[in-house]
């Protein structure tokens, strides 16, 4: 434990880890609940693909504009306090998404949703770093697995809401209330970090040259991951021509594959090595998306989505593990820089899918995204062997 970290009550590392894991679960569950209702919201507001892509841009704009603000808050207040505010803000805004009755209302709410996700996610990961310092083995991948498990649970909940024709407003309001209750219950069990004031510095720090490959791999993986969140159900509906419930089911299958991949990732790395798993991941992404594009049928698309889910499951935790060994930057600075670039892919790429889809069709959009899998494969070969 570092001098800047103290525990506010006599709690074991395991108890702190569980409390932090709860907030990863809340983040994943809330986001997947929204993502599972995107096709319904698109239909209710009569949006085409290009319009939906434009609306989705509100979220990354909100996040990117508040990145410097979050860093400033974390230098003045404990990450626990910022996480409490971020989680509550995230939960409240989630409820308003389901109440939007016009495009401009949805844009405004999604902008606020991006702001809240920035506050919530960065502070939650700062908490995870503090808990990681209490262990002599890696536990970060497990936190990512819990986020995915929560995403699966939120997607499954959305599937049943769609199946039973429950309104989006009632659905997201119910989820919001649950998130608030769990936030208030578990916040006292998280770790306290004394804020450390930071000297004046640039708002954004680029990764060292030796970490550029890691940053681009992270960008490609997170771009594919969020493309699947935002567009997988719509792809099933528009390209495969299935009903809404089955389309949402396609998203659920993707989440199952990604969740499974993250929980078996550590064992796979121990057996095959990090670089080999990264190569396999790139191959899975490339082949999975290409399979769904070349053979747009229910069985083949499901198989393709399973491959994509497995492909994106462990890339980010593995990249963080390798980048943390950097000798040119501190591990915290390295991870923060790589995360920033990776998150740009997570937020900026999916909205472009709508514009490409409107101009050339969703199959072309997914075909282009498959090239990011090929990029991962190529970049892994540029990483020095001492990172394996």
Image (spheres, rainbow, N blue to C red):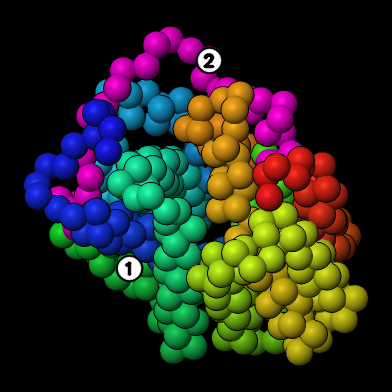
Q: Earlier in the sequence, mark 1 or mark 2?
A: 1
Q: Residues within 10 Å of mark 1 (few under 14, many from 20)?
A: many
- Asked whether residue 216 is in view, the answer is no
Vertical arrangement, residue 197 with respect to residue 334, above or below: above
Front-most of 297 and 11?
11
Measured from the top left, where is residue 293 in percent x and y? Answer: 85, 73
- The image's mark for residue 202 is 2
- What residue is shown at x 53% (from left), y 15% (from top)? 202
- The image's mark for residue 175 is 1
- Side of 214 relative to 163 (left or right): right
Measured from the top left, where is residue 80 in percent x and y? Answer: 25, 41
- What residue is shown at x 38% (from left), y 57% (from top)? 24
- Side of 365 relative to 257 (left or right): right
Q: Label 2, secondary structure: give it.
A: loop
Most distant residue in the left direction: 9
Whether 317 is among the magenta residues is no
- What residue is shown at x 14% (from left), y 53% (from top)? 11
Query: Pointers 1 and 2 in contact (CB under 8 A)?
Result: no
Q: Label 1, secondary structure: give it.
A: helix
Which is more foreground, mark 1 or mark 2?
2
Most distant residue in the top direction: 200
Front-most of 13 and 312?
13
Vertical arrangement, residue 190 with respect to residue 340, above or below: below
Vertical arrangement, residue 298 with respect to residue 48, above or below: below
For the record, the magenta segment spans 186-214
- What residue is shown at x 74% (from left), y 60% (from top)? 276
Q: CA distance from mark 1 to mark 2?
A: 38 Å
Front-most of 282 and 180?
282
């Amino acid at each position: 434990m570092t001098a800047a970290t103290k525990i506010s009550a006599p709690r074991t590392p395991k108890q702190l880890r569980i409390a932090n894991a709860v907030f990863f679960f809340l983040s994943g569950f809330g986001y997947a609940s929204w993502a599972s209702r995107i096709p319904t919201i698109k239909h209710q507001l009569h949006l085409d693909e290009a319009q939906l892509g434009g609306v989705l841009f509100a979220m990354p704009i909100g996040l990117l504009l508040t990145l410097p603000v979050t860093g400033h808050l974390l230098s003045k207040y404990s990450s626990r306090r910022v996480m409490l505010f971020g989680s509550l803000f995230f939960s409240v805004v989630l409820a308003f998404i389901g109440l939007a009755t016009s495009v401009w209302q949805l844009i405004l709410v999604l902008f606020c949703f991006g702001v809240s996700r920035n506050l919530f996610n960065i502070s939650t990961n700062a908490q995870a770093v503090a808990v990681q310092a209490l262990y002599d083995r890696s536990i970060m991948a497990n936190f990512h697995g819990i986020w995915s498990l929560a995403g699966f649970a939120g997607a499954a909940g959305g599937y049943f809401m769609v199946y039973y024709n429950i309104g989006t407003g009632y659905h997201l309001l119910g989820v919001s209330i649950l998130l608030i209750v769990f936030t208030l219950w578990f916040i006292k069990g998280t770790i306290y970090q004394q804020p450390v004031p930071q000297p004046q510095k640039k708002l954004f720090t680029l990764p060292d040259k030796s970490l550029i490959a890691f940053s681009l791999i992270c960008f490609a993986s997170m771009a594919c991951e969020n493309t699947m969140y935002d567009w997988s159900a719509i792809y099933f509906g528009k390209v495969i021509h299935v009903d809404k419930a089955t389309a949402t089911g396609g998203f659920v299958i993707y989440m199952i594959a990604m969740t499974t991949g993250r929980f078996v990732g550590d064992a796979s790395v121990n057996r095959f090595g990090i670089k080999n798993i990264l190569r396999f991941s790139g191959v899975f992404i490339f082949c999975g998306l290409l399979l769904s594009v070349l053979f747009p049928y229910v069985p083949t698309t499901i198989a393709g989505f399973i491959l994509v889910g497995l492909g994106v499951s462990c890339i980010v935790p593995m990249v963080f593990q390798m980048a943390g060994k950097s000798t040119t930057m501190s591990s915290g600075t390295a991870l923060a820089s790589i995360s920033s670039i990776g998150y740009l892919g997570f937020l900026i790429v999916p909205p472009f899918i709508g514009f490409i889809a409107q101009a050339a069709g969703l199959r072309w959009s997914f075909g282009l995204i498959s090239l990011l899998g090929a990029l991962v494969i190529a970049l892994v070969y540029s990483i020095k062997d001492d990172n394996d």
